[in-house]
Image: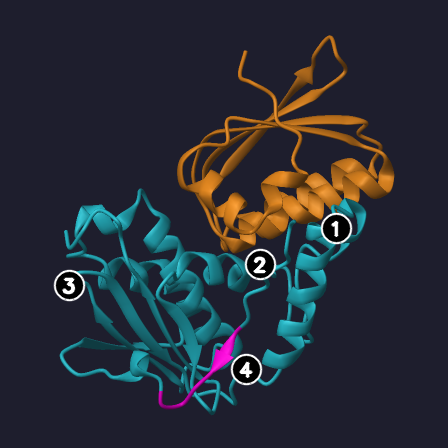
Chain colours: A orange, B cyan
Amino acid sequence: MEWMIGARDQGGFENVTMKGDCDLYSAPDFAKAMLSRIAGGAARLRFDLTEVAYLDSTGVGALIRILQEGKRRGCELRFRGIDGSPRKVLKMSNIILLMREEARP
Amino acid sequence: MKRLIVRKLIVDERNELFDAQGMRYVVFPSDFSKIREFTALILADCPEAFQEGNLLEQQLSEIIKNGIKHGNRNDPAKRLRVWYDLRKRARFIVEDEGEGFVLLDEWNDFFRKRQTALFEEDFDAFLALASYRGPGSDETDGGNSLIAALEYWNGGMIFNGARNKVGVVRWFTSGSG
């Protein structure tokens, strides 16, 4: 999976666009990068999962760690574009309940 | 009135889910880098109706990963055996050569606490308990694969007495495919 961090929008959110399979091979690096961003003082992050078609338990675990760190450091988190099997996986593990979702623009 | 119902991992050596008669069989080396490849091989002839996008692939790969990583500890000398049957439903038996899931009871305790926090809508506690972390957990462990698995394998998820073999089945409302 690749990810790209866009410029801050008017609401102060940095957009993180994820693309590809968020799985046991890619999710640990993604988590590391995002945790480091939050630790570095990011105040608002928005994750767009529109182009993520595969999410496994390591990917879910990465999102959990981001949610935990965001809560701990007061970083506001938003999520967009969670559909298909990634949505089902997040529902089965109940994690979707912790994610503040926004409609795609 | 709302009632809390918490599923649990079950150990049952003689469960019918371990009857491998008529099932196809394959053996894999403990190669962590090929977990998704092994999964794709097994599902090469899988009816589309069973795949549910890539949900079946994802759930099967979790079991294969658990066997290779936690069971066999990525030891190349240890093998993973998989029996599978994709007629009428998706059914698998996966056996590793490790010491077994010794913390199964602790996991059930963890899961009860987690689901209780969710039931009580204590979301701070739930977030803290969202992932299971055991002594062998590292960054490639999401700590939630068994949670989703208990939901996904709607026909059962059973461990053998040695806890190194798991039998699972999922039925589909769309029929036999």
Q: Which mark is residue B144?
A: 2
Q: Which mark is residue B87?
A: 3
| Chain where mark 4 sits | B
From the image, tell me which residue sits under label 4.
B101
Question: If you read the primary sequence from the N terminus, does the residue marked by circle 2 or circle 3 appear first?
Answer: 3
Q: CA distance from mark 1 to mark 4?
A: 29 Å
Determine if marks 2 and 4 fall on one subunit: yes
- What amino acid is labelled 1 in the image? Glu
| Looking at the image, residue B62 lies above or below residue B95 | above
Q: Which residues are magenta?
A: B9-14
- What amino acid is labelled 2 in the image? Asn
Determine if marks 3 and 4 fall on one subunit: yes
Q: Which mark is residue B120?
A: 1
Question: If you read the primary sequence from the N terminus, does the residue marked by circle 1 or circle 2 appear first?
Answer: 1
**Of the pair A26 and B84, the residue shown nearer to us:** B84
| Chain where mark 2 sits | B
Between marks 1 and 3 in the image, the one whose residue lies nearer the viewer: 1
Question: If you read the primary sequence from the N terminus, does the residue marked by circle 3 or circle 4 appear first?
Answer: 3
**Of the pair A58 and B91, the residue shown nearer to us:** B91
